[in-house]
Amino acid sequence: MSTTSARTSYDLERIRGDFPLLSSTMRGNPLVYLDNGATALKPDPVIDAEVAYLRDISANIHRGVYELSERATVLFDQARDKVKRFIGAPSDGEAVFTKSATEATNMVAFGWGRKALGPGDEILTTELEHHANLIPWQELARQTGAQLRFVELGEGGVVTAEAVAAALTARTRIVAITGMSNVTGFMPPVTEISRLAHDRGAVVLVDGAQLVSHHPVNVAELDVDFLAFSGHKMCGPTGVGVLYGRRALLDAMDPLLYGGDMIVRVYRDHADYRGAPERFETGTPNISGVIALGAAVDYLEEIGMEAIARHEEQLLEYALGRLDGVEGITLYGPRGVRRGGIVSFNLGQVHTHDVGSVLDNEGIAVRTGFHCAQPFMRHLGIHGTVRASFYLYNTRDDVDRLVEALGRVREVFG
Amino acid sequence: MSTTSARTSYDLERIRGDFPLLSSTMRGNPLVYLDNGATALKPDPVIDAEVAYLRDISANIHRGVYELSERATVLFDQARDKVKRFIGAPSDGEAVFTKSATEATNMVAFGWGRKALGPGDEILTTELEHHANLIPWQELARQTGAQLRFVELGEGGVVTAEAVAAALTARTRIVAITGMSNVTGFMPPVTEISRLAHDRGAVVLVDGAQLVSHHPVNVAELDVDFLAFSGHKMCGPTGVGVLYGRRALLDAMDPLLYGGDMIVRVYRDHADYRGAPERFETGTPNISGVIALGAAVDYLEEIGMEAIARHEEQLLEYALGRLDGVEGITLYGPRGVRRGGIVSFNLGQVHTHDVGSVLDNEGIAVRTGFHCAQPFMRHLGIHGTVRASFYLYNTRDDVDRLVEALGRVREVFG
Amino acid sequence: MNLDDDLYREIILDNYKSTRNRRALESPVFKQEGVNPSCGDDIELYLKSDGDEITDASFEGVGCSICIASANMLCNAIKGMHVDEAEALVDRVKGMLTRDETPEFPEGAEDLEAIQGVAKYPVRIKCALLSWNTLHRLLEEVRGGTPAGDT
Amino acid sequence: MNLDDDLYREIILDNYKSTRNRRALESPVFKQEGVNPSCGDDIELYLKSDGDEITDASFEGVGCSICIASANMLCNAIKGMHVDEAEALVDRVKGMLTRDETPEFPEGAEDLEAIQGVAKYPVRIKCALLSWNTLHRLLEEVRGGTPAGDT
Ligand SMILES: Cc1ncc(COP(=O)(O)O)c(C=O)c1O
Ligand SMILES: Cc1ncc(COP(=O)(O)O)c(C=O)c1O
């Protein structure tokens, strides 16, 4: 296996050893996992952290004065600190644990938006968005009478600062934009967009579900007001996400959920609420998940997000080169711009699911369909794509296996 | 250890062997875990199910055509079937996975309540409620102009069918009531309350966070419209809860969150939504958590909820007898009525946290404070209680250790 | 498992490529849309009837080979059937795909055996069933009487 | 770990039982409420000053022994201090409980050493700190000038 690339700064073979699934098979063939855009595989340290809590602690947080509860609380709080450090959260920023990136965008849409928006106000977004960063805004617009507007997309689904500038108006209250497209890997120029938006007095939310797992992110440098992302896409467990936000904005927001642990005092007919993050974390949280997310952050940091991004960049380049040579292929997404390690394509008229099934039978896991991005599919004039998405453990060999298997698709579907 | 009780129908010693924490120590003493009201310990089969997903599957559900995703999807769907069977869900009922019981009550309050309630309508609840089944209704009342009303509590915090009947009016639209108090273990007569409420045309939501983990529950027999509960209190993992609801009510509800997987079609400015359960499960769910909850259901069912309830009942009786003899103790909660395995008490004027810390040092985990039930504390005229709550694995020996340690409290605080 | 035996048998691919039933039928006609939200497959099923006898059937839409092949077989199979026979056929196909049954198919519907292999791929079952679930709903309308396509 | 050495040393229990500083002070007075939402501890801290010198301090409320003992020591310690000295003391107590420091306490404040053991019980640290965090906010008011308790 050509698993070692001269330009990957970490020991790819060793890293692969951390992921139990990478030595397994699928439908009788060695697994090639290229569906990292949907979710990442979990390395041993993350699995171990989850088990350590379940086996050796098990207790609830914040509520008990006994040692087990104390240990749970300490680990939980440490995980928050790790996450904040990982995204470069400034001291006036806070990280709220959610169940997913989806919950995080919704928290802002409804907790912030219902208070901040009125008829005639504008929400600016793009047709590139994952449904998680689109439908909440549609619904908010419906509820408040605000208007949902879209940045004009360039060739291959590019969003430029100029296009954002042209779409911003005096009524724009928020710019809700992806940090990295889950269909093409395209990465909008977030820092410039933030500056433009802030100049207009608008708030910026970045959907970082793809960005944060694959690239170094510093919210202070990006100068964003909110950042939403998911643990499971960054080698963490399922059921935990993060909403980063500026404390002043968070403290002024309504929560989506009401209950225990978010309160200062409760009377029969009303209650006083705490500030962030507690106000947004009512109910017993996903304690094992949060702790394991902390372990995922440790794991990624030890390898280094710079190194991971570089590795994926090289793999993408290699993949684009090889796929360009596949007969009958249509590749989507822009060339020659910053892109994360995602390729979307179609093979002639073969339905994406059929491509997916043939690849599955060769041991190759890809994602097929509309990728929770129907407006973007409509923009491209297609029903779906086959998507291969890379992560720190993928190799050139994986790409070769993919290309080879696409030959099988042509055999079956002629 | 006197771990075998003549009247416990399962092998207590063997069951205890399934829970790794039960053979551990706390502050140097063998652990006595009496904080089951906050969360339950996890048995090996549940931990194993969680690990099996993380190690051997890792994939996202519903989205991939490849084998790993297929396996995840099948296990996820099976877990839903198990949960529905566990609570006796009829064919016109559905189970929605949430992140917690708290999210489940909020889903109903806002998804159902915002549409169903108007000024002058009434929400009927009790002062027994956990904040998770109180604050959402306060907030809903504030938003809709509906009125929050309380059933008159009897001696020891009892809720009788008569008191409910007296509080119901023609304007009552929902009765939101606990199935089992997390402070006293008291179990309101839910079946009768449902009948009374339905006669008045009101909907019934039961907060089953305590009830479902400790007693056999059949929603068809109880005739409730909604039931909210948490996985972590029934030997399952953290970060997963359930909202059971009648399908007709669910299908008419708005979701709390909007995003992927809940949609039929998405356009730029609007989207068509699916029915239950998908409409309420947008975003990548807690896949490992749901699967492990399925394993928890299997585990509990194999032992039998009847047997567990009977075991706890005996333990409660024994504990009440022993605690009655403790000098300076005040025990809360009604006697001679149906109660789950929970005892709340105070020891003279000693602050509950101080009691908790002394017990902690003896290896005994109890919960102290207001138990997310401030209105009930106010009703009792106290600031908090010390709470010991039992589960299937607790023993008479645990009770003896507790009573003994209370002696230490008196030594320290004289 | 062998892909060619299970999923992509020649009969399936032939039915997938067939254009015979891929068209709209003119009013008055019973029609019903079927969508698989999770994969985006979306078909429109058309049905003409003379009383309780199905006189013509066709479909339009997008879907994977399994979805389209299944819909094409469906149209071939039900033409000329009584609505009750068609309903029984729906149940047989479902039995084969979800209850592990090996049904006998009536004359003219034998092709349907070819989709039995789909049962080995749980996430593809819904592809094969889309048209059949749609037919089930449509048959209720046919029994009801007036074609909705009329309005 | 030994409970008697760490958490419940005699000095702590004595301070807990002491009623000396447990009372309201009359207007004009600086006062501030402090609440630990997760455990319900809730105190009201009172402070009188003559310019920048703290002339009297007291508290009321409910809390566990650690919380109350700490508040009592606080009142004993800051009487007669300049607000800057009091602020420095807040920092020293926090350093001891959250940054593993072993500070030297000024005369009259030596009792505070007794709460060092609380640092071994992370969830009780907030009990010990409640009054100090409250004092921190109150000192800002004192520097501001007008007692809020006046209104
Ligand atoms: C009666 C009751 N209701 C609701 C809850 C809330 O459960 P969760 O924290 O899992 O949302 C609890 C648990 O603390 C409870 O005891
Ligand atoms: C760009 C983007 N945003 C949001 C999401 C939603 O993430 P989750 O399903 O974890 O809520 C995803 C993942 O599918 C994504 O790729």
Image: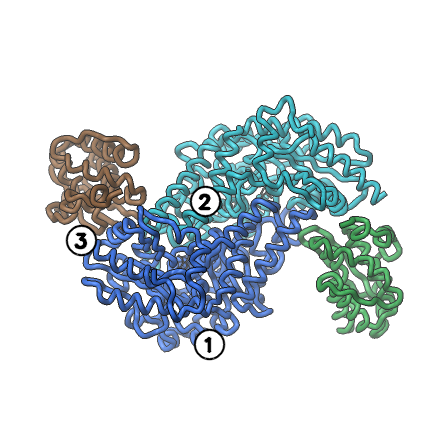
Chain colours: A cyan, B blue, C green, D brown
> Can I make out residue A159 in this image?
no
Residue under pointer 1: B195
Q: Position of residue B68 (x, y in %)?
A: 65, 47
Q: Amino acid at mark 2?
A: Ala
CA distance separating discs 1 and 2: 46 Å
Residue count near mark 2 (Cα–Cα under 10 Å), binned few <14, some 14–19, many ≥20: some
User: Quarter of the image containing the C terminus of chain A?
Assistant: top right
Between B365 and C70, the one nearer to me in the picture: B365
In the image, are marks 1 and 2 on the same chain?
no
**Chain letter for mark 3:** B
Q: Secondary structure at mark 3?
A: helix
Give the number of the mark in front: 1 or 2. 2
Q: Residue at x 34, y 63 (%)?
A: B2
Rendered-image quarter of ligand 1:
bottom left
Q: Secondary structure at mark 2?
A: helix
Query: Which labelled disc corresponds to residue B411?
Result: 3
